[in-house]
Each structure stands twice: as structure tokens, then as C-alpha cells.
Amino acid sequence: MPNEYYDVIIVGGGTGGLNLAALLSHAGKKVLVLERSGEEGLGGRAASATLNGSAVDNGIKGLIMAGTQDEVFRRIGKEIPENVCEWTNSGQVYMDGQWRKLDDMIQESPNEFIRVYKQTAVDLTYEQLEELEDISIEKFVTDNTDDQNVIDFFRYLGWLFGGTLPIPTDYSAGSLFYSIKKQVDTNGFMPSQSYWVKGGTGAIATRLIESIKENGGEIRTNTPVSRIVIENGRAIGVEIEEGPKVIPTQFRDTTLFEAPVVVSAVAIWDIFNILSKDDLSPWYAERLEYTHRRTLNLATLTYELDKEGLWDHTGQRWAQKGPVSGKPWCASSLRYSEDKNRYQASFWMQLGWWEKPNYFQMNDASHKTALKKLFEDWEADVKILFPQVVENALWKIRAFGPATIMEAPGNVGSKLIDIEAEGIEGLYLVGERTSAAKIMGVYGSAQTALKAFDLIVDKYPVK
Ligand SMILES: Cc1cc2nc3c(=O)[nH]c(=O)nc-3n(C[C@H](O)[C@H](O)[C@H](O)COP(=O)(O)OP(=O)(O)OC[C@H]3O[C@@H](n4cnc5c(N)ncnc54)[C@H](O)[C@@H]3O)c2cc1C
């Protein structure tokens, strides 16, 4: 098969890769996206499926309104998919056997809260926030106040901010406040405005794919890349294996797809399948490995219901310690499906970091047993705290997966990798793993796509 030529080859058709492909093809670049899964897997971890006529997301529970995904849609001239349900920061925390309103922590110390909050998210510029990248939240907040309510508030901000769980106190203050500032700039004063996408988060991928194709971009599914090819310090293309794989040990022929710019948009745990550490500078390889070990794993439980108002669906509930599981988890809002009068109650639980017992390498029976028990105990928690949800469920889905690096302990700016692979000409990495992401999840991926786009067209102008 003859070699093929493109301006930019993007490995991975998750939202990171698709956002970048949409931006580049809209700007006139000849782009090829290679995705290992089938059509239905486009969107990656943000893909959606349909179950009994309802959209089911691949784990995702809500998107942070931080403006970056909207910015991509604005630049490519497409509407951002419609938002079906918003939630705000009016939630409650289940601690010491009772529900406590997070708002109360603010109300008990309003002036001090506003002072600390204002001097970060509101008054500091994005450039000044960059300087806080290597400072932990714990240090930043305790250096700025003695007020326990304010310290607690920032500790619980992970819940408020992304709808998940408290972020570790050694997480980067710069990244946290950057994300808050983006949300403040997009929505007004308070952070943590999140929303459900109509048709599931997969609707984002669908619209990006439309735009890529309209602008002459190419997407090949069922095409796993086996290697990014690097020669004499520059990326020259990617190799894919050809022909049927008949026996597991078979060595197949490869085809080279050439491009002066290659983007890895695969998740962090897949990077070393396509990139050899030996090709990278030792320093960059070390940072990549560090990031790789800092993955946050999430489990989610979704119940579909046909009743309205089981609890205030604009707020979230966070159980600091589940009554049976003993683990912290978050109860997200209900998604309203206008056409069918259906709701989805969503629960999510943060599992271990990469180096802790890993529920995602469950090739052996003991891991499967552990995960089964985890879900059973968790469902028992839900039944105690939200009996109406369990009793009225039309169906439920248990899901789990590696989610993000954003909240990992010690995850401060300069330890994370940059978008430009140091020492290798023409190689870029996008997705929520890079230091440029800052915002969690899909909006973090969009943020890195925007930055990668600027870097690429600056260095390789559109002819
Ligand atoms: C359970 C769970 C809950 C989550 N909840 C939220 C949430 O509520 N809000 C939020 O914003 N985010 C959430 N996230 C995170 C969000 O899903 C991710 O941050 C985002 O989708 C990452 O996009 P990405 O493009 O960087 O990576 P991915 O979506 O992982 O895309 C990478 C793509 O690369 C492909 N690939 C890998 N290797 C190869 C190869 N060799 N060749 C070709 N293709 C390859 C993969 O198949 C995949 O499609 C959640 C994730 C999980 C797992």
C-alpha cells in the first residue's frame, strides 16, 4: 500500500483529538484522525450509547461550564449542543451522620470567604495564576486565612467545582483557580455551574465529526496506531498494522501515514503503546511517567426514573462516608429528558489513584470480586440515603474507568507534561493530561486542543 500524506495526523478520536481536528480542518489543514474503536467509540470516554431509548454516557455525569468547549464551537461556526439540565452550587455534604449545606460554610464566614475567593479567582489575571501552578491549595489557603470555614470550603471545592469529590489538598492552586476564573468569566461570580448535554456528551463528538468532514478532514475508525514514527528528532508519521490478525502472536505488515505534525490524543495510560520512552528526552519521559501514575479512577451508578423532583435537581449531594461502603461518593443531579419525562439519577465515586489497588486492571477474579462488592455496598448506601431512587428505577447501569489526572495528589503544574513534546520536532500531546488543561474532563481536553491549535498554526502556518 502506498504511503499517504497529511498536514496533521491525530491519533485518538476522543474529544481532545476531535476538537483539535475540527479546529485545524476548519483552518484549512489536511487532517487525518485515526481511532482504534468503531464509529460508536468516536468521542472516546465522552461517547454516548442509547439504552431503552435514552442516552447513556460513558461515565460522564456533567460538563463544567468553563467556556473552552463553547470556544471551539464558536471558532468552527457550530452551535454547542443544547443543554438539558443545569446544576449549581446549592448542594449538601453528608458528614458526621447528617447533611450540611456547603453554602452554610460560606454564610458562616462571608467576609473572609469573599476576601480569599475574590483575591484569587476574581482579581488575579490568568498570567498571575500561572505563577501559582506549583503551590498546593493547602498552602495557598492556609497562607491566606486562619478561618476554618474558608479552609474547609476550599477543601470541598473539588465537589463544588467539578461535581466530584474533594480534591487533594496538595493539588495545584494555580490549576484550581484558573478553572474557577474561567467559570467566573463564563457564568458570573460563582463556580461550579455544570450541565447535561441533550443526547448525551456524545452529541459534542457528533457535531465535531460533522464539522471535520464538512471541512475535508478524514476520520478512520477501527484503525489502531501501533507507533508514532520518530526519526532524527522529528515526528514523521504513524504506523498502522495491516491485514487480518489470525493468531495472537502474528507479526503483521505496517503502513506508514506521513505528516510533518503528529498529535497524540490518546489517554495517558495508552501513550506508551504508541510512543517509545527511548524516543523522548529523559526529562520529558520522566514527566510523562509521573503523570501516568496520577490517574484518577471513577465509578458511576446511573438510575433512570420516570418521576420528577426526587430531590432538588439543581443541587448535588456529597456523602463524605457512605453508611455501608464507608467510602465518599457524590450524588449528581437528575437529568431531565423533556421528550420522555424521564430523569437520570447519577452517583459517582472516586476510586484509588493509579498506585493504589487498581480496579481497572481487572483481569483476575479477585479484582472482579472486589469491584462487585464495591458496587453492592455502594448501592446499599444509595438505598439508605436515596430509597426513592432505587425503588423507582427503570434500569440502572454501573460503569467505571480511568477518568482524569486533574485531581491527583501532588499534581502541580511544572510536573505535568507540556503540549509540545520536548526535543521532538512536530510531536504534540493533547488531552486532559497536559499542564495546559487545568480544567477537568472534556473542558480540559478542549482547552488543550485550543492551545495545540495555536501552537501548530503558529509553527506550521496554513498555506
Ligand atoms: C467514569 C468517568 C466519569 C467521568 N466524568 C466526567 C464528567 O462528569 N465530566 C467531564 O468533563 N469529564 C468526565 N470524565 C472525563 C472525560 O471523560 C475525559 O476527560 C475526556 O473524555 C477525555 O478526552 P480525551 O480526548 O483526552 O481522551 P479519550 O476520550 O480517552 O480519547 C482517547 C481516544 O484515543 C483512542 N486510542 C487509544 N489508543 C489508540 C491507538 N493506539 N490508536 C488509535 N486510537 C487510540 C481511544 O480509543 C479513545 O477514543 C469522566 C471519565 C470517566 C471514565
Image: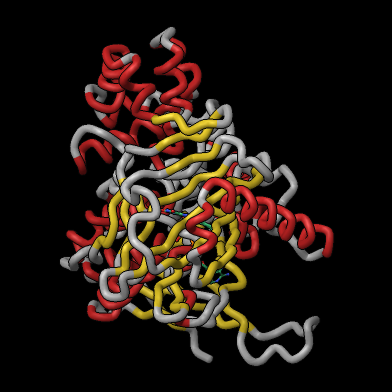
Across and down, in percent, residue 366 comes to 83, 59
The residue sitting at 40% across, 60% down in the picture is: 16
- The extreme top residue here reads 146
Q: Nearer the viewer, residue 397 or 7?
A: 397
Q: How is the image coloured?
A: secondary structure
Across and down, in percent, residue 175 comes to 41, 34
Q: Nearer the viewer, residue 436 or 173?
A: 173
Q: Is residue 9 above or below residue 268?
A: below
Q: Nearer the viewer, residue 83 or 392?
A: 392
The residue sitting at 20% across, 42% down in the picture is: 187
Residue 229: quarter of image: bottom right
Across and down, in percent, residue 286 comes to 63, 41
In the rendered image, the quadrant that contains the C terminus is: bottom left
The residue sitting at 25% across, 21% down in the picture is: 118
Residue 39: quarter of image: bottom left
Across and down, in percent, residue 151 comes to 45, 18
Residue 103: quarter of image: top left
Q: Is residue 3 above or below residue 127?
A: below
Asked whether residue 240 appears in the rendered view, the answer is: yes
Asked whether residue 135 appears in the rendered view, the answer is: no
User: Would residue 345 appear left or right of 88 to someone viewing this image?
Assistant: right
User: Would residue 37 appear left or right of 276 to someone viewing this image?
Assistant: left
The residue sitting at 57% across, 27% down in the picture is: 96
Number of numbered tags placed on the structure image: 0
